[in-house]
Image (tube, rainbow, N blue to C red):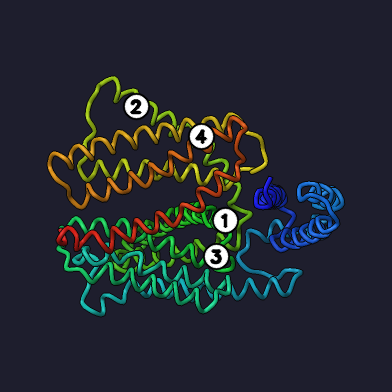
């Protein structure tokens, strides 16, 4: 075993231990971090004394004592903590942590207000949400995501170099969204509206990992952050829908129509501000939502596996071709992205040292099914391009399917190796986290290169 393999295995053990500790609701995040610092210090001392990393880890954990007993001790001393997790602010027994929490809240409010205000800035230049869809579509992510990146960069105490990179990438996104002479019905407008948010979300990822840019573990944390952010954003959106309904009903009851306020202010400004609020909730309340990840993946993985297998059976039975028009291309790409998202989210929630089980075999079936569908779509797209020529939509779909094909093919190989006991789970994690820049590169190619190449079609 190489030194790198030993280090990877040790980090996987720490990840397993951290995941187990974080499930203890009696312990705050600061408690977990303090315990991990003690554990890492003990492991370093034992390694320096001549033990192998895996042996040092086991000895250090044993020295720390029973985690159950430790959790009970924390619970006896701070029985109110579980309730405080459900409160946004409040006093704690740690003045430094409480001060940090208040600063985070202030920074979140500033960034959320900035995101909400950004939505209204284009109106100062004569734009409107109803009449300028060709502007707001490509620029929607640019109005909100820079503020989320700013909040995360502030939390991570990003260096000036990282802040400069973030600023340059968002500026590049603004150029891609506005510099080209695109007609409102241009295919490039739709492609930019789809791909620029992906590119900019990965820029947000740079802000998230600003404290350790080269860490594979931090990239996996960003994948987990993405899933949890989505859960919080959906919950906020559902609550916002209820608020909107009550606003309509209550004001209409007194003869005032709130339609203009809701459509022009509440919905767009709320949607932008919610991107920052959801990110803050993930950062502040990780222990409240993180247990949703295993539930969601175990619920939807078998359902999507069954749906994909049913599609493949129906395709083979009917021998019908796949419609490769724009809507169908978007649908199949979204399907493959959802499958990949399930794989990534389940990886972020999985115990990395647990042996392979039935769920891992089910994931292998899911990846194989998605891989087969990807190949079928690629064959259809290639045939249509050869026969009728290419368009921006078909070229983008072809590239995206090639990018996904490479990821899914190697993921299937790694999952198979893990299920058979030939490869560690850490190899699959490294592959996925190292592949993230590929998505960013492709998204930037679509928004920057495609419009001029296809004559702004």
Residue 447 in percent (x, y) is at 28, 61
At a point 79% along the width and 61% down the height, the residue shown is: 41
Q: Position of residue 425 (x, y in %)?
A: 60, 41
The N terminus appears in which quarter of the rendering? top right
Which residue is found at the position 58% from the left and 35% from the top?
A: 418
Number of the front mark, 3 or 4: 3
Q: Position of residue 222 (x, y in %)?
A: 53, 57
Mark closer to the chain start, 4 or 1: 1
Q: CA distance from mark 4 to mark 2?
A: 17 Å
Task: State how far apart marks 3 and 1 are (Cα).
Answer: 9 Å
Residue that badge 2 annotates: 312
Q: Secondary structure at mark 1?
A: helix
Query: Which of the two residues, 17 or 87, is positioned nearer the viewer here?
Result: 17
Q: Secondary structure at mark 4?
A: helix
Circles 2 and 3: CB atoms closer than 8 Å: no
Residue 216's label in the rendered image is 1
The disc at residue 213 is 3
Kindly indicate whether the residue at mark 1 contacts the one at mark 2 (C-beta within 8 angstroms). no
Residue holding disc 4:
363
The crowding category of the residue bearing disc 3, from other C-alpha atoms within 10 Å (few below 14, some 14 to 19, many at least 20), is: some
The relative height of residue 39 versus residue 415 in the rendered view (above or below) is below
- Furthest toward the left, the residue is 388
> Of the residues under marks 3 and 4, which one precedes in the sequence?
3
Q: Say which of marks 2 and 3 sits in front.
A: 3
Badge 4 density bin: few <14, some 14–19, many ≥20, Cα 10 Å:
many
Residue nearer the viewer, 47 or 83:
47
């Amino acid at each position: 075993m190489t030194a790198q393999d030993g280090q990877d295995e040790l980090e996987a053990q720490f990840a397993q231990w951290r995941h187990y500790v974080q499930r203890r609701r009696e312990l705050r995040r600061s408690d977990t971090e303090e315990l991990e610092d003690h554990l890492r210090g003990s492991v370093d001392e034992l390694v320096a004394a001549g033990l192998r990393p895996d042996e040092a880890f086991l000895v250090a954990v044993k020295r720390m004592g029973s985690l159950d007993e430790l959790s009970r001790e924390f619970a006896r001393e701070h029985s109110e903590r579980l309730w405080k997790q459900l409160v946004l602010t409040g006093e704690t027994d740690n003045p430094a942590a409480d001060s940090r929490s208040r600063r985070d809240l202030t920074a979140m409010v500033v960034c959320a207000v900035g995101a909400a205000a950004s939505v209204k800035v284009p109106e100062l230049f004569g734009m409107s949400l109803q009449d300028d869809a060709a502007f707001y579509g490509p620029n929607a992510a640019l109005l909100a995501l820079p503020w989320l990146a700013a909040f995360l960069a502030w939390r991570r105490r990003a260096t000036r170099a990282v802040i400069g990179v973030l600023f340059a990438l968002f500026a590049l996104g603004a150029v891609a969204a506005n510099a080209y002479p695109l007609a409102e019905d241009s295919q490039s407008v739709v492609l930019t509206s789809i791909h620029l948010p992906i590119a900019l979300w990965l820029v947000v990822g740079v802000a998230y990992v600003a404290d350790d840019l080269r860490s594979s573990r931090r990239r996996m944390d960003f994948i987990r952050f993405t899933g949890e952010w989505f859960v919080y954003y959906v919950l906020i959106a559902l609550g916002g829908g209820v608020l909107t309904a009550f606003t309509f009903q209550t004001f209409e009851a007194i003869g005032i129509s709130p339609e203009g306020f809701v459509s022009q202010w509440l919905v767009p400004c709320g949607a932008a501000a919610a991107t920052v609020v959801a990110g803050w909730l993930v950062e502040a309340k990780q222990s409240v939502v993180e247990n949703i990840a295993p539930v969601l993946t175990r619920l939807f993985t078998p359902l999507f596996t069954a749906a994909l297998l049913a599609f493949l059976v129906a395709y083979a039975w009917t021998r019908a071709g796949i419609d490769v028009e724009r809507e169908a291309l978007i649908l199949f790409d979204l399907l493959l992205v959802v499958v990949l998202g399930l794989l990534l989210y389940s990886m972020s929630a999985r115990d990395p040292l647990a042996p392979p089980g039935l769920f891992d075999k089910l994931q292998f079936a899911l990846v194989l099914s998605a891989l087969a569908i990807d190949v079928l779509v690629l064959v259809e797209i290639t045939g249509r391009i050869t026969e009728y020529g290419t368009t921006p939509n078909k070229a983008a779909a072809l590239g995206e399917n090639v990018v996904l094909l490479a990821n899914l093919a190697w993921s299937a190989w790694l999952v198979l190796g893990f299920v058979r006991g030939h490869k560690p789970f850490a190899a699959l994690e490294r592959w996925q986290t190292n592949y993230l820049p590929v998505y960013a590169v492709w998204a930037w190619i679509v928004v920057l290169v495609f419009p001029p190449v296809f004559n702004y079609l």
